[in-house]
Each structure stands twice: as structure tokens, then as C-alpha cells.
Image: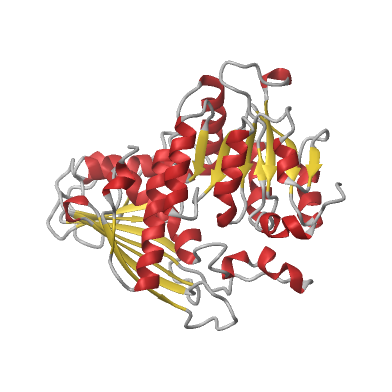
Amino acid sequence: MSDNFINRRKFIANSALTLGGLFVADMALFGKATSSENTVQVGVIGTGKRGLGLINTIEKVSGLKVAACCDIIPENLHAAMAKADPKAKAYTDYEQLLADKNIDAVIIATPLYLHYPMAVAALSADKHVYVEKSMAFTIEQSLDLVKRVRNSRFVFQVGFQYRNFELYHKIKDVVNQGWIGDTYSFECQYNRNSDWRYPVNDPKLEKVINWRMYKDLCGGPLSELCAHQIDAVNYITNSHPIKVMGLGGIDYWKDGRETHDNVRTVYEYEHGIKATYTSVLSNAFNGYQIRILGNKATIEIERNKAYLYPEATKRTLGTVDGVTGATILNATQGERTEIEYLGPGEKMVEPTINALNDFADCIVNGNKPVSNVETGRDSAIAICMGLDAIETEKTQYWKPEYDMLS
């Protein structure tokens, strides 16, 4: 372990690496042979809860191997090294990890405000990049990353794993085929009953560990929870919002935090589609849920399942049956039918496994990820617009220059 574990000069830059975790993956260049046995050597930057989870997931992905781990908290780093390849290297400075020529790619699982500078550094170091959501903290950073990725030879993937989830592929097909009607809206919630804090033994590490509490480090519930649903709606509608209004507050957890403990936003998309995103940290009822409302039916999405609720008008065989395979002659409102998205005998694959499989495949074959820098830009900007709407209590609009690189 290096002597510069936490020096004052790099403390702020390194601190946000902690709990979110720094996960870097060694990935080879297009057309260049990877390391032994054709395996992509991955470095993990940030080995907190999410980073450690990614390390565990990589064990289930063919073609990826954790060859290096980086974190500034010893307990996080030790836990990661116990899961990594026995020959993996340990780092406490992510720049040293990026300088390792044996690393092909990096997975960045750090606090939000570090995503952009680390992604830029990784691209400059000739690494493929998998960066956790959201890919950037500001609109300007998002636009700059698009330029940098397009001028590079490397794979750049954003950790919105639901784009790689068969359930959402099926839902997008159901919506596009008109099963719920021509007019629809979205109601999204991501609720918890928790203060979202972690214990801190050393007061100097408060912002390192509890970075989600501070506005200069992340955007609170909207950027850390609702972000997945914002990206899911962008994916299903194949678009981005054109304006947003929002409110938020610190009304329950009055513990010195700066980020909100409740947010409510309303986004408008093309063709009059509206989407509401709500997150409260004082009530976990129904937890994660998305409802898509059309004039013919409603879709209700839970974590790993989705249901179709027809409107009161009777449905003949072929309407509901065509979506789900159910043998229903007619239905009334409130009678739900599960939307089947797996074939006979198939088992659900955890979305992050699919996402990392996509990452490995794109590196080997030179393809573009499903969750790429352009889709990542659209979701990052949408999140920033929502945060600005909450902060200013004014409607925020999508600007034409955001599309200049589309």
C-alpha cells in the first residue's frame, strides 16, 4: 500500500471515491490482443458497496477479470482484494492505477462529482470506461464527455443497466405496439424509509463516507435514485424531456444534510407525454415503481416484474393475449395480467450481468454499448435540469445546443 494513502493535496479528489467505490477494469484496445487467455483485465476504482457488488458480478461474466482495485478506505480495499484475482494489485491512488499498462479498462463506481474527472483521466490513459450513473455532475461535463468519447477509440458505457434488462425491452415493445393506447404518461417513484447515512468513526471522513448528504458531491435522491427511472423513460420513449418543474425539501431528516430528503418533479416530453418522479426518504411504501398510463391500459413495473391493467372496456382474446400469452376473453379494470418477458425455461439474468456482458462484448468486437455516451448525456442533462428546477423553483428547458452532438 502506497505511502500517500490520504495526503491533504489529494484528499478531496480521493474522498469521493470511497463509499460509491472506485472500480476500474483493464480492457484492451479494439483489435489489440488482451492479456492472457483473451481476458479483459479490469481495474475497480471505488470498492465501497456498489464497487464490491460489481466485483462480485464480474465473477459471473466471461472474459472479464478484476486485476486491480483502488480505494482510500482500507476496509473497502481489503474487502475488494479478497474477491479479486489473487494476482490483482491494490491501489490507493486512482492515477497510479490508470498508469498501469496491464489494465485494459476501468469501471468507475465513485461518488457522482468524481465521475467526470475520472472518466476523462481514464480516456486519456487509453482505457475503456464503464462509469456508474450518472456519467457527469453538470450539463457542461456531459457535453464535453460526448466530444471526448467520439474522438477516442475506446468503449464508453454508462451504468444504466435497465437498458440491458429484457423486462424493459418487452415493455418498450408493448408500448410501441400500442397496447396501452396512443396517449400515455409516466408515474415514477423510488421511496425509502432511511436516513441514508453510514456510521463515521473519524469526523474527517464525514463527507467521504456520507457524500450523498452534500450538494457539492451529488444531487441527492434525484441523481442517486430517480436517475434510473429518468433513463428508463428516455429509453422507452426513445427521447429526452423538453422541460421540467420540481420541488424538494429537507422536511424529515433534519440532521445537517444539504441534499433533499424528498423530491417531486414533472417532466414533459414530445407529444405531450408527462412523467412525474417522486422520491421520499421517510416512507418506503411500494418502494420502486413505474406506472405507464394509456387510454387503453396501464403498465405497472416493479423490480423484476410488470403487469398490464386494461381499462374498463372489455378486451377480446388477442388484445391482452397478444402481449402476455394469457387466455383471457375479456377483462375489466383492476384485473392485472403479468407481462411475460422470458421464454419457456429461461431464468432472469440480473441486469448488471447483462450490462457487463455488453461492455466486454463491445471491447472485443468494437461495438457501441446500449447505454452509451449519447444516451448517458441525455439522462445526465435531464437530471441536472430537474435539480435546477428544484433549486430555482422555475421551469427548466432543454436547449438546442444540447442536441448539437446528436
x, y (%) of residue 143?
42, 45
Q: Residue furthest front?
A: 9
* Viewer-nearest residue: 296 or 184: 184
Query: Relative to residue 175, is residue 38 drawn left or right?
Result: right
Residue 119 location in percent, x, y?
Answer: 57, 42
Residue 28 or residue 281, whichever sits in front? 28
Does residue 324 appear in this view? no
Q: Is 225 drawn above or below residue 86 in the view shown?
A: below
Question: Which of the two residues, 38 or 102, is positioned nearer the viewer here?
Answer: 102
Q: Is residue 2 left or right of residue 347?
A: right
Q: Residue at x 67, y 55 (%)?
A: 13
Q: 41 above or below 337?
A: above
Where residue 364 appears, as percent x and y from the top left, is: 56, 22
Name the outermost residue toward the left.
313
| Residue shown at 78% from the left, 44% from the top | 91
Q: Where is residue 316 shown, x and y percent of the image?
A: 14, 46
Residue for point 39% across, 52% down: 381
